Image: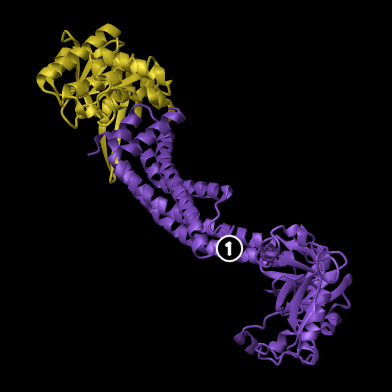
Amino acid sequence: MLEAVNLSKTYISDGISYDALRAVDLKIDKGERAAITGRSGSGKSTLMHLLACLDEPTGGKVLLDGKDISGLSERERNVLRNEKFGFVFQQFFLNGRETVLENVALPLRIRGWRESKIRSAAKAALASVDLEDKAGKRAKDLSGGEKQRVCVARALVGEPQMIFADEPTGNLDSTTGKLLEDMLFQLNAARGITLVIVTHDPDLARRCGRVVNVKDGRIETDLGAKGEVR
Amino acid sequence: MRLLGIIRMANRSLLRNKLRTFLTISAIFVGSFTLTLTNGLGDGLRAYVENQVKNIEAERVMFIRKQPPAAGSAKHNSEPPEYDPDDSDNGDGLDPNAYSYTREQIERIAKDVDGVVTITPQYPIDGEYIMIGESKKYRVELGMLSSGVTQKTEVGRTIDGDDQVVIPLAVARTFDPQIANLVGKRAVIAYKNAAGELKTVSPEIVGVATKGMIVNTNSFVDARTAEAIYKDQKVGNGPDKFYNFSLQMRAMTAEKAAAVKAAFQAKGFEAETLADQKKRTYDAIGIFKIGMNFFAMIALLAASFGIVNTLIIAVMERTKEIGLQKALGLGRGKIFLMFSLESILIGFWGAIIGILSAIVSGVIANRFLVSSYLPSFEGYDFFSFTLPSIVSVLALVSAIAFIAGVFPAFRASKLNPIESLRYE
């Protein structure tokens, strides 16, 4: 379970402080799929960055399975992200000149696994997004949908307990976007991986079930799959 | 991430931009190439000098000569020297007599120094020809070997008594390819006396000198023989004054050498052991080497800015990649290490290519120069490449590259992952 308690983030630039997030409380259960929505500048990305330990809060804390993870050292947070979290971004951030397999292998290289173990895990991750036949291709030669599936495989390869997806379908047409959504939901269902999806696509948000709407740094509404208030 | 993984990633990043990497390496190559060559030239020169002097030893001998006068302006600003009846310098430093002395003058200075056995002037002698038995006559260049000075010989031994000569290898081979046969025979050496008449001496050939610069062409006779020839050649020409003297000591210690030096320095003379003379030459070569290396270092300095430039561009280009790597858990230290490794690899490969090219060019130059221009220096390498100097060039260039990489690597390591992922 991932829990935000009184979480706030204030940016200061040129002496002017800006509250991106104001005292947010949020609980996301294990295996849940939650969409974080809101307009741009609402603070939804900041919320995700804080939940994913990519950034440090200025107030409050984030608990993972009851353990405070916002107070960890940089090194500990690096290990945590590497082992517990997977990431899918709107821009794919693939290394076009490297092979698909090499791109997928990155989190495990960072983890420091043995070469043979890395290769077999990366192949397995590619198989679960139906791209095992593209393993030896260069990433730049893939289509957009394929690239994002490679990103999913990269998020998956470290066997994370959560995947954070920041506008995962933002660069895809609606058909390939749907396919990718299906893939993510299927992983959630089959492996119990918690999904946190930042999106402004209402359809995707609805499909997630739980929708957390952020406005002006606060959670405006937090509705469950049946429309109940959470 | 493991070190091997980081090395692998650094290598891949370098290969991703082959042209840029190649150009940066080229700059380093020029610097390493120059440094290796200048080092090789210095080492070659040193080896050459070593080769020349190693055949001569003089453990218990000191060499005395008048110190050169102070430069003009220094003299103008100092008090005039007190009159000294032993000092024949007329004050302008240009009179050749100012540097020559009689044996008695030197003996007077040395009389208070403990342990001096004899004082021998270096007799300047001129020979005309040398022959053995009924052989042809060959032109001879005559030299004198002071007692206490020994030279290495191919066959036979060095001069160790009176009425002896050591002939050079080339002369010996002309007389008899089996040079060992010559040892023990008597050579006839002719010279012209003061009246211009040909006179001969016939010392015993005790040895054939090993090749080397000084002993390459001269036939050396003992001091007594040299003295006899000198007196015959210079008879009636005023007092016997000489530029150089050698001082034979009973035993040589550092304290003894220092005492002799002090006694002679007080009178404006320079007293040196052979080791001092060698050291002075090596010091000069050392300074020459430093001077040459200075230019190579300038080239390397320029090249190191190339590395800084290349890596800063790489950091900018790969900002998103670095952001992703950080998001996925790669620590600052590892990012720093990765960029440092890229920098070191550029330096390392530039140095390797530079060193190898320098060695190849040096070896070719050695052959070419010695065969076309310096045939008498046969066996001498113009450029000499030693393992320690090669390793030190490699280490130095890699270190310079590392230092050049510190700033870009630090910049990469402190990038904020979120901002980097947003970077356009």
> Can residue B205 be seen from the camera position used here?
yes
**Residue depicted at 47% across the width and 54% down the height:** B364
Which image quadrant is residue A105 in? top left
Q: Chain of mark 1?
A: B
In the depicted structure, whether residue B116 falls above or below residue A154:
below
* x and y percentages locating residue B268 in the rendered image: 74, 81
Which colour denotes chain B? purple
Location of the N terminus of chain B (image quadrant): top left
User: Image check: A39 left or right of B202?
Assistant: left
Towards the viewer: B209 or A86:
B209
Towards the viewer: B361 or B65:
B361
Towards the viewer: B321 or A34:
B321
**Residue depicted at 70% across the width and 60% down the height:** B210
Among the chains pictured, the one given yellow colouring is: A
Which image quadrant is residue A13 in? top left
User: Image check: B49 left or right of A90?
Assistant: right
In the image as oriented, which residue stretches furthest toward the left?
Answer: A174
* x and y percentages locating residue A36 in the rendered image: 21, 21
In the depicted structure, whether residue B72 falls above or below residue B256:
below
Structure colour scheme: by chain
User: Image check: A40 left or right of B391?
Assistant: left
> Can residue B145 be seen from the camera position used here?
no
SS for callout 1: helix
Amino acid of disc 1: Phe
Towards the viewer: B156 or B327:
B156
Give the residue pinned by disc 1.
B377
* x and y percentages locating residue A181 in the rendered image: 18, 15
